[in-house]
Image (spheres, rainbow, N blue to C red):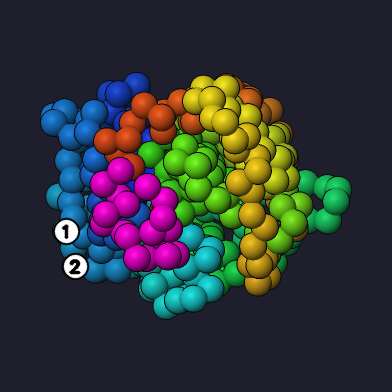
Amino acid sequence: MRVIVTGGAGFIGSALVRYLIGEMGYQVLNIDKLTYAGNTQSLLSVRSNPLYQFLHADICDAEAMGKAIETFAPDRIMHLAAESHVDRSITGASAFIQTNVVGTFTLLDAARAYWEKLGDTERAAFRFIHVSTDEVYGSLGPSGLFTETTPYDPSSPYSASKAASDHLAKAWHRTYGMPIITTNCSNNYGPYHFPEKLIPLTILSAISMRSLPVYGTGENIRDWLYVEDHVRALDLIATKGQPGETYNVGGRNERRNIDVVRSICEILDKLQPSSRPRETLIEFVQDRPGHDARYAIDASRLENELGWRAMETFETGLAKTVAWYLENDWWWKPLSSRYAGDRLGLREDLV
Ligand code: NAD
């Protein structure tokens, strides 16, 4: 099996590359522009494996994408490259439109040129997996779940750009017949997560006894999925999923942000006792504009049709994640000097 992964130096992409090579034994070409979110250190365990190849390129570069796809001749393309941080999209939407919309279009068209030249058997077996987010569905009230037929209603420039990319992927299936599958997943967490997102930011701040910023009153609810459960789902969907269809991926782990932060404090207080309980470090900060109240995924299609189950509960996954950050400061410490001063990326006072 030959797989192109875009965005394979990012948080989910690197977990996917490690899984496809380490567990599945696939040949992988990772195409990544290495933005601030890309980190080849996350691929240390596979970088010297002969199954792994890397191309430093932008998915908006049509010529580079065409050449890479023709040369590598993949059985599958798994598209994860994106600008992914909602807060950054609010202060600078341009990169999000460029990478998430124009980049997805460029990649789809390069993949189409390659796919149309394949023989009948290879054309039918080829898969393009477009990896997206539940944020395209907008916000839920206190009850209900997102299903694959929930109407799109994105709130942020990030989710609007991902919604646009989903529509492009679906159009390339309906118009050209390409075997494309879209996945919409809830919030991921786990090792190698860039510390601008809630869970790693809280863990690293709490390790060094810094203040723990929480938006608004911390009531917003997210549905958390351990990243390794997500990547198993992606490979399963590529293998058994129906072309042209959408699969929601989620772990049935709805938690209020404030409770996530409190759980991290509790775990760390046990692992690294301190005279001051870490919960007292929580600081409520001005809410994010357009902050969606609640996301929750109904993953029953993926569970019933493809037999997927999340292997981690939120409690086991969070405990593993906190332990990983404690044991792997070689990975996150260098980020503090690279991004010091970039207050959106990593707070200066973090380490
Ligand atoms: P990330 O920000 O950690 O990684 C993105 C990667 O894409 C980085 O390695 C970056 O260098 C690369 N990249 C960015 N622009 C590029 C370009 N123009 N050309 C080539 N490479 C480029 O993101 P992530 O959290 O790993 O998310 C991966 C995908 O999964 C995204 O499409 C995101 O929308 C989706 N997703 C994320 C979550 C989540 O909770 N993190 C949930 C659901 C879906």
Label 2, label 1: how many angstroms apart (C-alpha)? Answer: 6 Å
Q: Residue at x 27, y 36 (%)?
A: 330
Disc 2 target residue = 63
Residue 114 x/y as whole percent? 26, 55
Q: For residue 97, which quarter of the picture?
A: bottom left
Front residue of 225 and 54:
225
**Relative horizontal placement of residue 132, taking residue 191 as reference (left or right):** right
Front residue of 274 and 230:
274
- Residue occupying the far front of the picture: 275
Magenta span covers which residues?
333-351
Secondary structure mostly seen in the magenta stretch? loop
Q: Which mark is residue 67?
A: 1
* Label 2 element class: helix
Give the class, few, some or many, for how many residues have Cα within 10 Å of label 1's Cα (few <14, many ≥20): few
Q: Do the residues bearing badges 2 and 1 touch, measured as CB atoms within 8 Å?
A: yes
Q: Residue at x 47, y 37 (%)?
A: 207
Looking at the picture, which amino acid does disc 1 mark?
Answer: Lys
Residue 152 x/y as whole percent? 68, 64
Q: Residue at x 24, y 40 (%)?
A: 41
